[in-house]
Amino acid sequence: MRKSLKYFGAVLLMVLLFPASEVKASEIEDLFWSRQWTALETKVRSLGDQASPKERVIFANALWLQRKWAQALEILLEERKGLPEGLKPFTDMLILLGFERTGDDRKAEEAALSLWKGDDWVLAPHVAYALGRLSLKGGRVEEAKKWYGAMAESAKDTALRKQALEALLRLPEPDPKYALALLEIAPFHREALSKIRKDPGPEDPRTAFPLGYASFFSGDLEEALAQLGRVPREAPCFERAAFFRARALSNLGRADEALPVWKELSLGGSRYSQPSIELISRMAREKGGEALEALVEISDIAQGDPAASALAELAGLFAGTGDEKEASRYEAILLDRYPTSRFAAAALWEKGWSAWKKGDIRAADGAWTRALDAGNDPRQESRLLFWAARANEKLGDSRTSSGLLERLRKGYPTDYYTYLAFPSEPPRIRDLPAQRAAGEGEELAEWGFVIYARMVLSLSSDAATRAASAKLALWLGDARGAFLDSIPFASMLGRTDPLPRALLEGLYPRARERDVMAASARFGVDPVDVWAIMRRESAFDEEAVSSAGAMGLMQLMPPTARENALMLGEKEGDYFDPAKNILLGTHHFSRLTRIFDRVEFAVAAYNAGQGAVGRWLPPKGPIEEWVEDIPYGETREFVRQVMANRYVYRAIYPDIEKRGSSNE
């Protein structure tokens, strides 16, 4: 995979989208891509019969994007016969939708049936969805069920499959299997949960996990216990159910009953081993006793990461109580048995940090250098490089310090620690010369079929093709799509200098720009801060729901959303609405920036709450040390990522106007 990424990385450095450098775009094309709709229409009308078929089809697609269905349909019907064969299915798709949206359902259904091909991975789910809608309009419920089912089967995209399952669930007397399938995609889907509560009911073992999981996150812990306890051991979701059942027990004050469950999961080696060990460690810090014994037992009998994790937790636990002898003993066992584990790297980081805080810079450098030399945790490398460089600077070894910082800058150009090291030297970015791409997706885009071009391009594993897809997604206003197209290739940023703007714009899009700029102006907030938070909180998923119940782009907790809505005189509810979510989240952040005098404090408060941050102030050293000492690991990482995001956003979009009180 790494080799192929390097190859495609080289391709990405050579290829962007249209207009192609060797082909001059027509005025019609320029007006289309710049979205100058009025000027485009004027130009096409002035050309009359002299407009080429391509120019007329581009105009039709422009009309379609403006929801002028009838006008677009008329042109597509006139030009359809003369189009290249590869474009005809997509033209026919717009024609059938045009018939439907102008009220001619009979012609729409005829067009859809002639277009239907179950093996067409691009259009099949969309044709099936149209046939389902048209069947339902005609009162043919069984036919609608068949077509919505075909859509669910042919959809390669989770969002399309969710759409199909929701349509099936809305039919009269739907099969509960659709609700169960929908809950696998959207575990808190209200209609699906309501359906399985009624039919097949809470006695059916298939409903145990989805009902229990939803109950846990809605705060009904007793119901969660009852439901999760019904999940059979042989079920694929048993370990997940056991983990949340134990969490429910602990939250109800029955941690002693949770402990054996966590212990079993810790030894099982599943994805729940690590979080279970961490919960046992937390219990041991609070109560000691059996939890401490369980942690010791896990460190003795487990293998690999579970054992290393338990040893690391024990070392940290005893260090926290001041028992340096026991802390050192467990640390030594960890470093001896698992020297290449990420837990060893974390232990060496903590050892170095403790020495740094005591003023023993040489010991700190020794621990951090040892971790770097082991190369056992790439996720910590940027942190180790930065602080090892600081240590060497203090020790008077500027040559080593400079070398470490150069490794940091080249290997992690968009990282938080690079921002700390080079706050006034943003990463270098360049616009690459556009060259002509090949394939069906580009042909579709050249004729204005942008939505379908993006569908074709987005499933490619080729970096250049996905960059083209991301660019089209941005043009369509789909920040989430651009981000998903780009994220598989984020690792290439550490291997290219200067950084390619096309990839960065996909990874750091200006989502919902009009709403963000309006809210930022209203509340005196730097819009870059809003996007930086949004990227970390939801990755631009407008329907995101966290395990704690946070909602939407800005991940607002229900009480926070209600409080800010009340302050602004906004109606309660509709918190997933992007514009409202951005408005309330930006207002909330603006309040935090007025309370705290540094953006790092406000960002931390956005995650951990105003009260928690108030307890951590004032800082007892430089701001970067304060961030490292944040007691909550999640908040510590949140601050790092948001600060890194705003650093990169400012580098990509230097012309965005800074506003408000987001102080450095």
Image: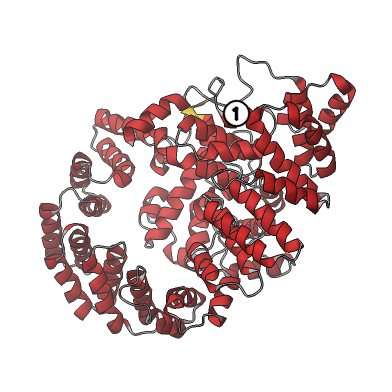
Relative to 497, residue 387 above or below? below
At label 1, the amino acid type is Glu
Q: Foreground residue, 634 or 121?
A: 121
Relative to 531, residue 189 above or below? below
Read off the residue under disc 1.
442
**Where's residue 493, x and y in %?**
42, 34
Residue under the point 38% across and 27% down: 7
Residue 72 visible, this orientation: yes
- Horizontal relation, residue 595 to residue 5: left or right: right
- Horizontal relation, residue 590 to residue 367: left or right: right
**Where's residue 199, x and y in %?**
55, 80
Q: Foreground residue, 94 or 36?
A: 94
Relative to 648, residue 84 above or below? above
Residue under the point 30% across and 30% down: 402
**Where's residue 154, x and y in %?**
54, 51
Q: Locate residue 10: give its quadrant.
A: top left
